[in-house]
Image (spheres, rainbow, N blue to C red):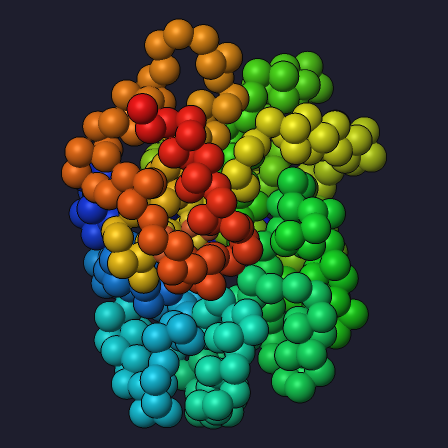
Amino acid sequence: MKKLGFGFMRLPLRNTEDPANVDIEQVIQMVDHYLDRGFTYFDTAYMYHGFTSENIIRQVLTSRYPRDRFVLTTKMPTMRLQKKADLNRIFNEQLSKCGVDYFDYYLLHNLNTSHYEIAERLDAFVFIQEKKRIGQARKIGFSYHDGPQLLDHILTEHPYVDVVQLQINYLDWDSAGIQSKNCYDIARRHGKEVIVMEPVKGGALANVPEEVQQLFAQAAPGRSPASWAIRFAASLDGVLTVLSGMSNLEQLMDNTGYMEDFQPLNAAERKIVAQAAAILKKSIAIPCTGCNYCIQGCPEGIPIPTYFSLYNAEMQSLRRGFSVQQVYYENYAKNHSKASACIQCGQCESQCPQHLPVIQWLKKVVDVLEE
Ligand code: SF4
Ligand code: SF4
């Protein structure tokens, strides 16, 4: 299988304010080109795109192509489970929404300390094992957003899982927060195949500062910054596929172009990536991936990732005179709560897979972007 997976979590939107308002015609073109170039792996989840991503899979993929043309993965929303009966109800709903009678890979979504506790209390691992036994899930596993110790514990307790989905990119590889390398090493020590998520860190490694762009351009003119990030992740042993949340046809054509005949990074290229990481570490203020998990429970409805992205752009700009970020912020704040509306309830921090101190960062947003 080619090592580029098509993630259905950042599809092109017709209205950027509405995650469910997806540009279906463009997604159809993207799916057709992706399959034409020999790629097969599609990744969705119950909650992506305002709970519509699985319906979109049916509309653009499963109703248009025979079942053996694609590999399909979806995920049980562990964070939404309240009772055991929810497992079967949601799973059946997912089969119906996706328009299939089995999933190639079925994962428990976003395990961390609290979600693992829910999974254990409700026997979610027993449930997915049973789905595998009866053929409704060909392979099983979980996606993971926590530290290496808990990962080791889960894999020791549940040695039968086939795959683990981990956040791996060259910026988080040796970071103290995400610890991509330590988690990857543990998964491999347990003999698991790894599905990589966030290889371009929510777009941060695609839209790199000028200095990094020049570094990459000198080494390989014409190759996109994203190509370095995706090839870095795909070069690791035991990686089944690298998911890319492609947001338009242009990105898809770029990604499939260099991954069609994938070449792992050589030693000189690995050095360049390490240099890029060092430069980026100095320039990205808030390592938010824009996953939106924090927004759902915010009682004030603060668009946290949008404000963080504006803050990052503001910090990367020269910050002289007119600030386009400030204009965006003011416009945004007309229809949404400002960062200063935060009541410090902590709900967002408990949901953040990147373990960001959201409350502290929102205070910085107030300092920099609010008049
Ligand atoms: S701490 Fe602030 S930003 Fe976070 S959920 Fe509560 S009100 Fe929203
Ligand atoms: S603050 Fe955390 S949860 Fe919210 S979008 Fe950023 S990375 Fe995701």
Spot the residue most to the top. Answer: 321
Instruction: Give the residue displayed 73% in from the left and 54% down from the top.
Output: 181
Residue 144 position, x and y percent, is 56, 66
Horizontal side of residue 245 vs 164, given as left or right: left
Above or below, comparing residue 150 to residue 158 in the picture? above
Horizontal side of residue 192 vs 81, given as left or right: right
Tally the marks: 0
User: What is the quadrant of the C terminus in the image?
Assistant: top left
Above or below, comparing residue 351 to residue 134 in the picture? above
Instruction: Give the residue displayed 60% in from the left and 71% down from the top.
Output: 163
Residue 357 position, x and y percent, is 52, 50
Q: Nearer the viewer, residue 234 or 10?
A: 10
Q: Nearer the viewer, residue 21 or 319?
A: 319
Residue 330 position, x and y percent, is 25, 27
Above or below, comparing residue 287 to residue 324 in the picture? below
Above or below, comparing residue 138 to residue 74 in the picture? below
Horizontal side of residue 255 vs 102, given as left or right: right
User: What is the quadrant of the N terminus in the image?
Assistant: bottom right
Q: Nearer the viewer, residue 310 or 259?
A: 310
Instruction: Give the residue displayed 46% in from the left and 69% down from the top.
Output: 109
Residue 205 position, x and y percent, is 55, 34
Instruction: Give the residue displayed 30% in from the left and 29% down from the top.
Output: 329
Q: Is residue 179 visible?
A: yes
Q: Is residue 11 visible?
A: no
Spot the residue most to the right. Answer: 267
Q: Nearer the viewer, residue 94 or 77?
A: 77
